[in-house]
Amino acid sequence: MDPQTHYGLLSLLPATLAIVLAFITRNTIFALAIACFVGVLSMGQGLMGFPTLLKTTLGTTEFSWILLLELFIGTVIAFFQRTGAIANFTRFVEQRALSRVKVQLVAWVMGMFVFFSDYFSPLFVGSTVRGLTDRYKVSRERLAYIADSTSAPVSVLVPITGWAVFISGLLIGMGPIETAPEAISVFVQAIPFNIYAWLSVLTVGLVIIGWVPSIGAMGRAEHRARTEGKVSRDGAQPLLGAELTDLQPFEGIKTSLWLNFVLPVLIVISVAIGTFIVMGSAKTMEAFLAAAVVLGVIMRLQGIALNDIISTALSGMKGVMPAIVILALAYSLNQLSKDMGTAGYIIDITRGWLTPQLLPAITFLVAALISFSTGSSWGTFAIMMPLSVPVAFTLTGDTLTPLVYATVAAVAGGGVFGDHCSPLSDTTVLASTGSACDHIDHVKTQIPFALGVASVTLVVYLGLGLTL
């Protein structure tokens, strides 16, 4: 492993500062902005370094995509609210006489069902089930945990997602892997070894049914919700604008659960999966654009005025703006971490520990540290796959063995760890958004479970390394 150029220990400063300030101040936007500002000053770029960082980072196709995706998702959610679709869904589920536990299990299953997009899943689950969980006195923190833990951890286990395509694409050219079908085959073979993702999804179900206790901050949040009826703590700042949380259904218009809710969801799923099968890439943003347009047309045919439809769409866009601002700053911090060589420094100080027995465990640990520090799973994959998998092939004589599969899975699971629980992660932000939960409250209540699963995963990989 050749060390990447980095700023040494200083390269950890921006990400560390952002995480620490976020917990201290409970204001993620302030923490990220200060971290970016201090980072550019540390690199000697002066006062103009901060606006320059924002311009270069946000003026990209990648950020434009996430920006448009969030705006269209906000529009669809606002249409759901305005047509009473979510209220209709709530009534439909309530007719099944569900219990508090079963309502949470519904959210868990819905999160696993929407496997094709870790962006759509937490927003869809949170916004759709929130009315139900509020009614059954389930804390917003618990809902955010369920929505978050069934997004990226599920997406990375399914071989027909963008995650599978991206990871397998990185594997082409390594060892005996020469073609895309061979790379996909390796990804599939590695799925059983992705301990972190499997345990993350399973743990949610065990927490819901009470086999795993709600410890620490999560336990306090659940006790507050059950005994006081407060789904959010006093003083919490939900990461969803009042434009969405306070949007009331249009009066005097009869709407349909199937036309106003089920059909748009089917459009999103069909377009996303269909484009993946035909084009090899799930067009998620285009799927939400199509759903928003179709739903807008249906609303007009149902008698809702055009001005009201446009106003509702704008309210939806405004409602997701807090999340967009955080994502913009998180993307900037991620770019800053790349420029300062944060990942390279972490790799440089850990590469001496690599042995055949420790390879899966150290790979998972390093990938987890990088993803938590940067909030980027795919960025972690791009860094760690070319570094760790060739080492595995060297140890196995360019032969596909369980050690190789375990190493690929360790990179995937380690990357998901940060995507799953880092306060800098886009998925973590979207889980807080969909659930209308205070972002730091979500992070604080989720981290103990994520760390517990990561610890078990590390022990399993140590055992696998000794066995393999």
Image (cartoon, rainbow, N blue to C red):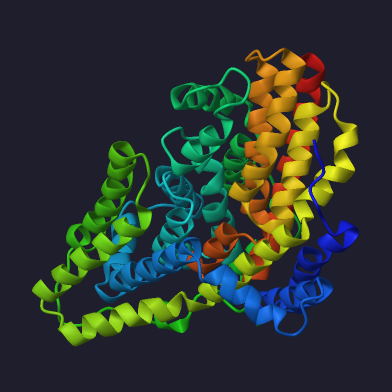
Please, is residue 38 above or below residue 412 in the view?
below
Can residue 221 be seen here? The reply is no
Residue 404 in picture, x, y percent from top left: 67, 22
User: Quick check: 200 left or right of 293?
Assistant: right
Q: Which residue is drawn at 22% across and 64% down?
A: 260
Can residue 271 be seen here? The reply is yes
Q: Which residue is drawn at 59% across and 25% down?
A: 190
User: Quick check: 400 left or right of 41?
Assistant: left
Q: Which residue is drawn at 67% across and 74% down?
A: 28
* Of the pair 445 and 168, the residue shown nearer to us: 168
Please, is residue 456 above or below residue 130 in the view?
above
Residue 381 in picture, x, y percent from top left: 63, 42
Count numbered badges in the picture: 0
Q: Residue at x 62, y 43 (%)?
A: 382
Please, is residue 347 above or below residue 286 in the view?
above
Which quadrant of the structure image shows residue 315?
Answer: bottom left
Residue 133 in picture, x, y percent from top left: 47, 62
* Of the pair 227 and 262, the residue shown nearer to us: 262
Please, is residue 275 above or below residue 73 in the view?
above
User: Quick check: 145 left or right of 80?
Assistant: right
* Of the pair 406 and 13, the residue shown nearer to us: 13
Residue 323 in picture, x, y percent from top left: 53, 72
- The quadrant in which the N terminus is found is top right
